[in-house]
Image (cartoon, rainbow, N blue to C red):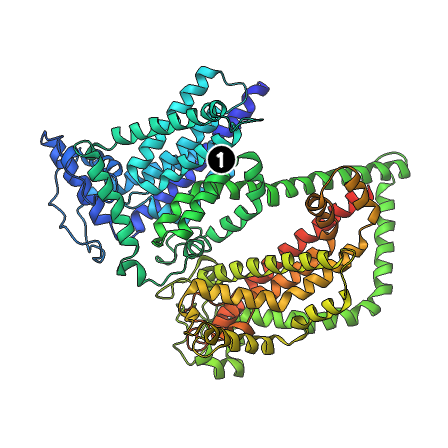
Amino acid sequence: MPARWRQPLVRLLAVAIVVIVAGVFHAVAVDGLPIDYDEDDYLRAGSRYATAIKAGDPGILLRENYRPEHPPLAKIVYGLALLPLEPAPEIPDQPTTALQAVSLPQPHLDVARWTAAILGIAEAAALALLDPLGGLLLAISTWQLKYTSQVMLEALPALLSLLAVLAYLRAGRPGASSRRRRAWLVAAAVLFGATCAAKYPYGLAGLAIAIHWLWTSRPSGRWLRPRALGGWVAPVAGWLALAFVFFLVFNPYLWPDPVGRLRDSLAFHGDYAGSQAVQQTGWPAWQPLVWLAGSVPFHGNLFPIAFDLGISILALLGARRLWRDHRVMAIWLLLVLGFLIWWPTKWPQYVLTVEAPLCLAAGLGARAAIVEPLSGWLASTRERYRARRATQEAMDGTPGTTGGAGTGARVRGNLRDLRTAAPWLLPGIVALLVLAGIPLLYEGAMALTDFSNTSLRDGILGGVMREAVGGLTGQLPAAPIDLGSSSRVQYVGTDLVGGLQAGVWLGDNTTAAFIAFSMIYMVLVVGLQAILGLAVAVVLARPGVRFVGAWRTLFILPWAVPVFVGAIAWRMIVQQDNGWLALLLGRPVPWAESPEWSLVVMVVAGVWIGWPLMMLVATAGLRTIPRSVLEAAALDGAGGWRRLREVTVPLMLPLLLPAMVIQAIAAFNEFYLFYVLGPNGATVATFSFFVFDSTRGFGLYSVSAAFNILTLIALALLVAWFLRWRGRAERVAFA
């Protein structure tokens, strides 16, 4: 096979695998998913289009758009898919707040669902053309599977928005002729217009294209001159105008009254965002991150793989590569996340607007964190084996004659060394097993049960081990998870660990809410602690600052105060009715009623308690930096900010990162602040506090154990990455 054919064939094989996986998973979803909200609405709209077109009345496209708050293109596609079927009885018109339909006409429901599924499969294949790992992750994402396997509006605009970005990327490929570049840009405009004609929020992909285009084509020099500014903005403005024309072309409902109907369609969303249906959910601004921190929690074990939390973690690991290699995708991802956090309506199907760039970032993260290290380890292992074999052959003479004797001698020598060291190692090994191994084993046993406050007596008296051992040996069947209802511990198998990773629905939110909040709280607290600690250390290290020792002593006091005492002090400050802040303002401060303000208060308190440690570490790090390095950077023309960013901070990272890891672990498991301050709402709590709080978490000890196992795995991976990073840094330092 010619070498030039090998890579395209491998890429096509990878795309075929992604299509097969996506097809199988979508088939399971189409067949197993119950009827969801809005499916009756969009099936009704598609059926009405199909019936009218079949009767020779295409004018229905101009006069009707059922649920006009959304553009009609996706509904028209459903109508075209239903054309070959005999008309079904019209589905009743129900308000948007109605419950799910009990039944819908067949085979119309299956045909419409498979129409959406084919579009979802096509999206996974399109992403696989850019990155096979990203396409595979998109194919198994449970959110993608659910909302592209039901009669929803998501599948078509999700596909069109991705195709628009891919067309734009093709236009920017090096070596492309101007004619081909224009053709791909026109294709991107057509797809962008069609995207908006299917569902408005997916048009953020086109906005990302415009931002990236403006950024990469910005003129140098005096670009603010009218001529330069016009030449810079005019092509992008023309492209946006062309996209708007195609938006109108694909939206025939607007033709009779473009301004009025478009205004009414857009105005609906602002009114709906403030409606009771949205407000009564009580979901915080970061709820989209909650959805992405777990899998679909509504349908049990319907989906073969629940890996959405892993996709989000891999996306974090691949964010830097996404920004470097596919910047327009990174802009798309940031735009959509910002919009989802800002927009009050938090329905879970909205996360499909971010799935394509998120899975691309996850694919890059998987390559950076798993594929490349594994392939590198295999290659280095093979090279070491070959080197040892060559060395052994050189020492033993003729290959294969005395090598066996030499190897046997080394093995016997190693065994003698082990026997000599065993008496000294054995006490430490036994102590490690007793102090660490047994608690970990017991925690693993707890995670296999439903041990909680209600079964506390039975669990302490041996119920945990009885159920865990009985279940593992096959003597007891796994019972359904029913936390907090039985006075006896029951064996539930691995469902709790798996369900916790995927997200368990608690009636008003999912357990992923605690994972997401803990991560957000940890990142904000540790990041602000590091910034504040570094800033104060740098200021105090400047020459001419007086009373440096007194300032450091004063600043270290928050860290010296016990966390519980510091939390009580903060409660005195922010108490809603009679706190110092309320007295200062002359009115109550009901911060605890708002998830967003609760997060702000908890983060401020957490930063105050922990930032002195970062200040001390930064102070020690500054003293390790040779003054000659900073003077050399200054002589090279680097200003103060550049010296800090490119010299001081990189040289301090070996000291700062271990402290940040320690602070991150403490923040992730924060308990005392939440216990004392007690913000309302289950979504404003770390998992450590939730499982303790018997009024909300039922003392879910087994859930805590399962979560600790997942945390231990994540911590082991984090430590492994840190040690690997330190090893690389030290090799660079000594090179």
Q: Quadrant of residue 290?
A: bottom left
Q: Quadrant of the N terminus?
A: top right
695 relative position to 432: left or right: left
Residue highlighted by disc 1: 328
Which residue occupies the foreground of this view, 562 or 134? 562
Which residue occupies the foreground of this view, 12 or 233? 233
Question: Where 112 sits versus 678, above or below?
Answer: above
24 relative position to 541: left or right: left
Which residue occupies the foreground of this view, 92 or 542? 542
Residue type pointed to by label 1? Val
Q: Quadrant of residue 606?
A: bottom right
Count of marks, rendered view: 1
Which residue occupies the foreground of this view, 200 or 506? 200
Question: Where 148 sits versus 660, above or below?
Answer: above
659 relative position to 358: left or right: right
Secondary structure found at label 1: helix
Q: Quadrant of residue 250?
A: top left
Expressed as whole percent of the image width and height from the top left, the position of residue 693 reads 47, 76
Question: Where 609 sits versus 242, above or below?
Answer: below
Q: Quadrant of the C terminus?
A: top right
Expressed as whole percent of the image width and height from the top left, the position of residue 549 reads 77, 67
717 relative position to 308: left or right: right
Expressed as whole percent of the image width and height from the top left, the position of residue 209 reads 44, 33
Expressed as whole percent of the image width and height from the top left, the position of residue 537 reads 71, 59
